[in-house]
Image: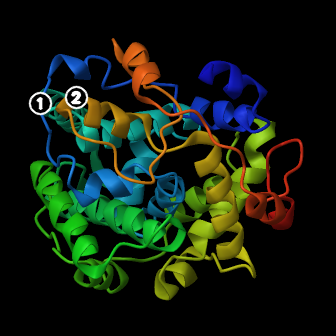
Amino acid sequence: MMRLLDRVNPRSAMADSTAGLFAHAAYPLEHSLSYPGDPGLFGPDSASWEVLGDVASFIGGIRALLIQAAHPEVVAGVSDHSSYEADPLGRLSRTSAYVTATGYGAMPEVEQALALVRRAHVPVKGTSHRGQRYSANGSAFASWVHNVLIDSFLTTHQTFGPTALPKARANSFVDEQAQLGAMLSARDLPRTQDSLADWIASHPDLAPSPGMEATVRFLKNPPLPLGIRQGYRVLFQAAAATVPPRIADMLGVREYPGAVAGGKAMVTTLRWSMGSSPSWWLALERVGAPFPDGVRFRRPPAAVGAAERFEASATPPDDVPQSMHETLKTGTDGVPVSVRR
């Protein structure tokens, strides 16, 4: 019955196309149910499962790529060694697989994901345009990449998530993720929301660079499928609106009027269409934990044995609230009309 309802859902095409963006790499938790009771790095009561499980993390990913590009050595490593321009969806899928595996995987899956990253980073070394050496496995490189990613997930959750975390739980998210950063050689690891934001906003090594300019141009207009370009533009503008002012000036991005409101509208639509992360459901199922109140899982993960369990445990989709009809009137592409520009 649920699959029939999904087929007639006017937003199902939007959910399928969005999920398809992340399907260009193997699903990292395919055998996760083979590790019953293993909570991985964080576990069901963690802030990490809550933050990473919401679609607001889509905006967080874009924001992280923008801010990471402000570090000349880090962006040189990406420009010199990455295939992101030739294979953007492949890189997006691999990054998503890393976040999924380390966030929701059992410990063997976490360790496998970390080993893949370490191997991939071995040849990523060189010299930036300003003559400074870099290595992706070095502490400074790893600290910037990790801290910006975590700050971006938290900032966008607090701005676009269903409910902002209380300060103590936001601090817990940063502290939980610091242990992951340490596993990838990061050493400068703030442990609170405010200290993390300050570390990024005041970082002394940031400066414009040719790699930064190329990355920002690409992120503004990536070669995405035609049907989702408009929606991506809304998410990009929402991400840019949350970049710290000093870094935004450096990147040459600005906050468009209505960008945050548009981002909230788009995320609300995505949340209703896609539900929470299937990998969050999988992790809860693996450890036998109850589902959090108010969280709706709409799709099973691509894991062995998951589909049958999902059908038995998931609740059918509810009707669209009238308030959503009024706030999120959409066109045939699923984009809220109110945020088209």
Q: Is residue 12 visible?
A: yes
Q: Secondary structure at mark 2?
A: helix
Is 229 in front, or is 264? Answer: 264
Task: Please report contact status of discs 2 and 1: CB closer than 8 Å, yes or no.
Answer: yes
In this figure, which residue is indicated by the disc labeled 2? Answer: 286
* Residue at the image position 36 percent from the left and 36 percent from the top: 281
- Residue 160 coordinates in the image, percent (x, y): 54, 67
Q: Which residue is mark 1?
A: 37
Which x, y percent locates residue 328? 78, 60
Q: Is residue 102 above or below residue 74?
A: above
Spot occupied by residue 229 in the image (x, y as percentages of width and height)? 76, 47
Q: Position of residue 252 (x, y in %)?
A: 62, 77
Q: Looking at the figure, which quarter contains the N terminus?
A: top right
Q: In the figure, 142 relative to 86: above or below? A: below
Q: In terms of depth relative to the viewer, which is nearer, 320 or 149?
A: 320
In the picture, the disc for residue 239 is none
Compare marks 2 and 1 and give the one earlier in the sequence: 1
SS category of the residue bearing label 1:
loop
